[in-house]
Image (spheres, rainbow, N blue to C red):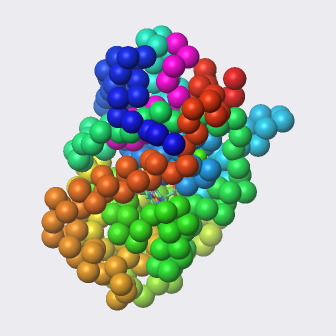
Amino acid sequence: HHLSENFYSSSCPSLFATVKPVLKSALSKEKRLGASLLRLFFHDCFVNGCDGSILLSDTANFTGEQHAVPNNGSARGFEVIDKIKDAVEKACPGVVSCADILAISARDSVVILGGPNWNVKLGRRDARTASKSKANKDIPPPTSSLSQLISKFAAKGLSTKDMVALSGGHTIGQARCTSFRAHIYNDTNIDASFAKKRRSNCPRQSGTGDVNLAPEDLQTPTTFDNNYYRNLVKSKGLLHSDQELFNGGSTDSLVRAYSRSPGTFSADFVAGMIKMGDISPLTGSKGEIRKKCSKIN
Ligand code: HEM
Ligand SMILES: [Ca+2]
Ligand SMILES: [Ca+2]
C-alpha cells in the first residue's frame, strides 16, 4: 500500500482548506467535538484498519460498528464528518474518501485544541463492510491491565511506546461514569481527594448516573497538552486503564518523561498517529469512495 501526503494535490487541491473551516466552526460551538473526532479515528483504525468502517450507520439489513460496546452511547461526532464530507463533495465530487476525511479531521482537531501539527498521509479508500464483533474484540476496554493494553496495540503493529503516547489523547474529552466507576470506588492506586471529587457525580450504584460525564484530564480537558501524564504521576488518572500506565510497571519511566517534557510527548504522539493511520488501509481499486460517509454507495 502507498499512502502519501500529496495524494489529492491535483485531484482536490482545496481539500485542507475545505475541511478546516467546517471543523473550526463546529469546535467553536463545542470543543469536545475535537476529542470525539480524535477518538473516532482511533476506533476506526483499530477495526479492519483506517477504512471508515466506524462511520457506517446500522440499517434494517446492515449491522455496523456503532453499537459495539466500545462505541455504543459514546462514539460521537458523526454529524461533523457528514458536514465536512458534504463540503468536500461540493469542491471535489467523488474524489476524497471518508477514511481520509476522518484522518484529516483528527489531525486538525488536535491542532485547533493547541496540540502538535503533522502531515497526514492520504490515499485510503472506504470499506463496504464493518465488523461489530471485531470492534468488540480489538478495541481495548477501560478495565484493561497494562499487559492487555500492550498486547491489543501490539496486535495492530503498535509498540508500547506508541500505546503510551497515543493514550495521551485522553488530554482532551470526557468519559461516562460507567467507564470509570470501578476505578474510583474499587481501586486503591488513586488519589483520595480525586476519587472523592469524581464520586460526587458518579454514584456507586450501577444503573444510576451511568452517563454522567467527567473530564479525562482534570486540568485542561479542552487543551491538547501533557497534563494527562502529570495527572497520572499524581494518581489522578480517570480510567483504570489510564492509571495502569503509571502503576509501578514498565511504562512508569515513559509517563514520567512525558509529564516533564511536552516536546517529547508531542513528537511521540505524532509518530504514533502516523503509524496508527497506516494500519491496513484499502488502496488502489479496493473499497470505494463513499458519497455519504454513513452508508455504502
Ligand atoms: C489505551 C487504550 C484506551 C482505552 C482503554 C480507552 C478508553 C476510553 C474510554 C472508556 C473513553 C470514555 C468513553 C465514554 O465513557 O464515553 C475514552 C474516551 C476518549 N478516548 Fe480513549 N481509550 C484508549 C486509547 C485512546 C487513544 C489511542 C486515543 C486517541 C489517540 C483516545 C482518545 C480518546 C478521546 C479523545 C476520548 C474522549 C472522547 C469524547 O469526549 O467524546 N483513546 N477512551
Ligand atoms: Ca475501520
Ligand atoms: Ca489537556
Left or right: residue 137 compared with residue 16:
right
Q: Characterize the magenta stretch by its predominant secondary structure.
A: helix
Seen at 60% across and 43% down, the residue is 54
- Residue 34 in percent (x, y) is at 38, 41
Q: Nearer the viewer, residue 214 or 8?
A: 8
Tell me where the magenta segment starts and ends, as one range: 93-107
Q: Nearer the viewer, residue 76 or 139?
A: 139
- Residue 130 in percent (x, y) is at 69, 44
Q: Nearer the viewer, residue 194 or 160?
A: 160
- Residue 89 in percent (x, y) is at 50, 15
Q: Where is residue 110, by image quadrant?
A: top left
| Res. 30 in view | no
The mark tally for this picture is 0
Image vertical order of residue 15 relative to residue 29, above or below: above
- Residue 209 in percent (x, y) is at 56, 61
| Res. 163 in view | yes
Image vertical order of residue 199 relative to residue 123, above or below: below
Seen at 46% across and 13% down, the residue is 92
Q: Nearer the viewer, residue 37 or 96?
A: 96
Seen at 35% across and 21% down, the residue is 9
Residue lying farthest to the right in this orientation: 61
Quadrant in the picture for the C terminus: top right
- Residue 225 covered by magenta stretch: no
Seen at 71% across and 49% down, the residue is 131
- Residue 102 covered by magenta stretch: yes
Left or right: residue 181 compared with residue 116:
right
